[in-house]
């Protein structure tokens, strides 16, 4: 393995995190440091460091006498994640409306156009990548990198659900309309309205997500989601 630019703990962290968020390691699945060390041709020590980091980020959990397990989300977890997103991302939308940077404002409009193009092309992967870029731009406009790190971690925790949810018929179109609404308020410099519209968008997203999980996913998810 080429580790000239990356430490072994970081290599192990990136690998395991990617496996989890992309559902190659399933919720409830047990993994071992020996297993990962063998796959990456490194010692177990940096893998353990990576496991501890992923535990702090809510992606792994350690069970006594059983070992490390991919964390399974509950409905309570989803509500807690969205409670924080509502507060933080609402604030970010308000602060972004105060941004005077014309280049970032143009970038925001351009990304929204990309999202709308992805909707018409029925391309959920492209839409999701544009959505990620759009929110990163909002954090730049708000000038709050710490908030960005907090929300990025929360999004990693429900990413495996988010990917399938985005692909649902009609969801990207509805979400894009909601995005356009709060972005128009941001570009108009109306921070209070932008915050309220962002919170409305996230509330609608949570409601639809919870309905889907309760009706379709959780009854068949023996090991959680």
Image: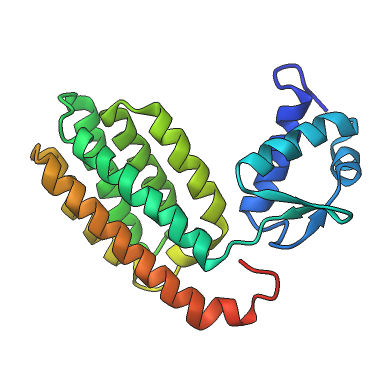
Does residue 48 appear to the left or right of 208 in the view shown? right
Does residue 81 appear to the left or right of 20 in the view shown? left
Does residue 192 appear to the left or right of 135 in the view shown? left
Residue for point 90% across, 30% down = 43
Residue 88 in sight here:
yes
Q: Which quadrant of the view contains residue 49? A: top right
- Vertical position of residue 87 compared to residue 8: above or below: below
Residue 127 in sight here:
no
Q: Which coloring applies here?
A: rainbow
Q: Which quadrant of the view contains residue 72? A: bottom right
- Vertical position of residue 223 compared to residue 31: above or below: below
Q: Position of residue 52 (x, y in %)?
A: 73, 37
Q: Position of residue 89 (x, y in %)?
A: 32, 44
Residue for point 27% across, 58% down = 201
Report the front residue among 11 and 144.
Answer: 144
Q: Position of residue 132 (x, y in %)?
A: 41, 44
- Vertical position of residue 222 compared to residue 4: above or below: below
């Amino acid at each position: 393995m080429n580790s000239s630019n990356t430490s072994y703990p970081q290599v192990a962290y990136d690998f395991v995190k990617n496996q989890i968020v992309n559902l190659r390691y399933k919720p409830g699945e047990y993994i071992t440091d020996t297993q990962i060390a063998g796959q990456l041709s490194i010692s177990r020590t940096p893998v353990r460091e990576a496991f501890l980091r992923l535990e702090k980020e809510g992606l792994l959990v350690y069970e006594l006498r059983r070992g490390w397990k991919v964390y399974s989300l509950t409905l309570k977890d989803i509500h807690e994640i969205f409670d924080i997103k509502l507060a933080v991302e609402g604030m970010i939308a308000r602060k972004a409306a105060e941004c005077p940077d014309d280049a970032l404002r143009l970038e925001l409009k351009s990304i929204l156009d990309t999202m709308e193009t992805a909707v018409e092309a029925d391309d959920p992967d492209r839409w999701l990548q544009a959505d990620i870029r759009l929110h990163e731009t909002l954090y730049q406009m708000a000038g709050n990198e710490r908030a960005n790190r907090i929300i990025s971690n929360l999004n990693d925790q429900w990413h495996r659900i988010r990917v399938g949810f985005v692909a649902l018929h009609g969801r990207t179109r509805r979400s894009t309309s909601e995005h356009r609404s709060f972005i128009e308020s941001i570009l108009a410099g109306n921070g209070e309205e932008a915050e309220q519209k962002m919170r409305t968008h996230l509330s609608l997203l949570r409601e639809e997500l919870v309905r889907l999980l309760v009706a379709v996913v959780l009854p068949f998810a023996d090991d959680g989601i």
